[in-house]
Amino acid sequence: MAPVTLNAIAAPLRAYGAVVLEGYAEPHAEVMALVWGPRFDREHALRLLERRPGYVPQVLHDVQKAADLFDRLADAERDRLRSLILRHRSLLRGDGGGDNRPATH
């Protein structure tokens, strides 16, 4: 996956993720839920954003762009992105792995 694409997909998360995902016990699971399927889960993204109404207009365009980029990725690139998310979670938790399932709510 081109670093530019990965950076573009991750940009909204880097910019707003801490606020949007605040209060979730497993924020990485929420992110995985967005990219678990063959297409970006836009409905789940909207539910996450609706928890922080002031951020919806500000972030919605960037999330839509990231979703469109994700949807155009090849399967192998999507799998790599998921692996990077899981790796990040493992590094932050210091557990070397753990539950790889996405959020289900």
Image: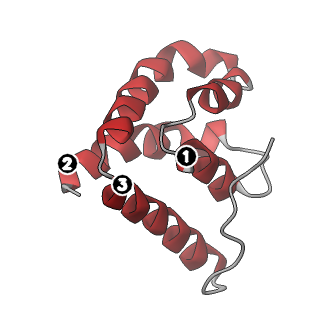
Colour style of the rendered protein structure: secondary structure
**Is 89 or 74 nearer to us in this picture?**
74
29 left or right, relative to 61: right
Q: Which mark is residue 4?
A: 2
Amino acid type for the residue under numbered disc 1? Gly
Left or right: 64 with respect to 7? right
Secondary structure category for the residue under label 3: helix
The numbered disc on residue 56 is none
Task: Name the spot of residue 104 as percent of width and height, x first.
Answer: 78, 47
Nearer mark to the viewer, of 2 and 3: 3
Looking at the rendering, which quadrant does residue 64 occupy? top left
Q: Tell me the residue at 42%/32% (across/down).
A: 67
At x 58%, y 21%, the residue is 55
Dot 2 or dot 3, earlier in sequence: 2
Q: Residues within 10 Å of mark 1 (few under 14, many from 20)?
A: few
Pointer 1 residue: 37
Amino acid type of the residue tagged 2 in the rendering: Val
Observer-nearest of 78 and 48: 78
In percent of width and height, residue 12 lies at: 43, 37
Label 3 or label 1, whichever comes before in sequence order: 1
Question: Which residue is at 35% across, 27% downward?
Answer: 65
- For label 3, the residue is 75
Residue 105, quarter of picture:
top right
The N terminus is located in which quarter? bottom left
Residues marked 1 and 2 touching at CB (< 8 Å): no
Q: How many marks?
A: 3
Q: Does residue 90 sit above or below 58 in this rendering?
A: below
- Residue closer to the observer: 16 or 76: 76
Q: Nearer the viewer, mark 1 or mark 2?
A: 1
* In the image, residue 97 above or below residue 17: below
Q: Spot the residue most to the top.
A: 57
